[in-house]
Image: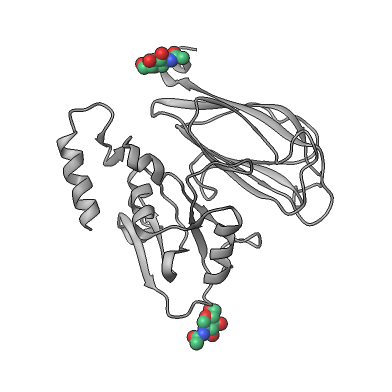
Amino acid sequence: MHVLALLWTLGLLLKEAQAWGFRNGIFHNSIWLERAAGVYHRESRKGRYQLTFKEAKAVCEYEGGALATYQQLEAARQIGFHVCAAGWFDRGRVGYPIVKAGALCGFGKVGIIDYGYRLNKSERWDAYCYNPDSKECGGVQTDLQKTIQSPGFPDEYEDEQICSWHIRVPRDQRIHLHFLEFDVEDDTSCLADYLEVYDSYDDVSGFVGRFCGDYLPDDIISTGNVMTLKFLSDASVTAGGFQLQYTAFNTSVFSHN
Ligand SMILES: *[C@@H]1O[C@H](CO)[C@@H](O)[C@H](O)[C@H]1NC(C)=O
Ligand SMILES: *[C@@H]1O[C@H](CO)[C@@H](O)[C@H](O)[C@H]1NC(C)=O
């Protein structure tokens, strides 16, 4: 609470400075909060609410991170991290971050919806991880333009990969995804290996599409300044992989077209 109170004060003090402050009820653009963007949501490969506390910890550690602390989750929430799914965070606490009040999620409240420290660590929930360092397989991307590729590209990717890229460009900009190469194990419903695109900062809301096979997907343009890509491969059969480029562009330029 002290940290939040301090941030609030800081927010008021620096309200004049363009780069800092509250807009639409959300605190934007502090360097400290920039790092808080390393918080992300994960669910089990089997779907929602399948991870015990131990498994949730393992999911985050597998990707080089750790379960997020309450403070990291709250900091991420303040820059717009909103996920309607309860997950484990540090020390066996469970909850989820809500930015916009809604009847269907969070009981109409805003904040961390906190289920408290769970006595039963075998309960199954999702996970909230913290990992501010981008790595080859996933990570937080804030560059204005970047090429993203499957792990090991141009070599074949390996079995059992889970990579999530969370792209966030400055507010008032949008993201243009353009596929350069695409070859992911083909099956009719893309159940084995796939790349998913979400028009949001998490892999829960804003689903755009799931892709596999060797047709180059069409370009995709975000509606806001965030986007998430999730690549998953199963335990058998791999393929050449993919390469795509994203580019940030000004909303004003787009609306003139
Ligand atoms: C703990 O939670 C698991 C999963 O919900 C349940 O199967 C188990 O019975 C619970 N244990 C206790 C002691 O309540
Ligand atoms: C986008 O807008 C910003 C601020 O108005 C400006 O500084 C920048 O040059 C613009 N970028 C492009 C690519 O037009």
Q: Quadrant of residue 225?
A: top left
State left or right for residue 36 relative to residue 230. left
Q: Position of residue 155 (x, y in %)?
A: 80, 37
Image point (83%, 54%), residue name = 236
The residue closer to the viewer here, 184 or 29, is: 29
Quarter of the image where ligand 2 sits? top left
Residue 20 quadrant: top left
At x 53%, y 50%, the residue is 204
Q: Does the image show residue 74?
A: yes
Quadrant (top left, top right, bottom left, bottom right) of the N terminus: bottom left
Q: Residue furthest right?
A: 237
Please provide percent x and percent y for residue 183.
79, 36
Q: Percent from the top left, x then y, of residue 84?
A: 45, 56
The structure residue drawn at horizontal position 55% and vertical position 71%, both measured from the top left corner, is 54
The answer to whether residue 199 is above or below residue 125 is above
Q: Quadrant of residue 95?
A: bottom left
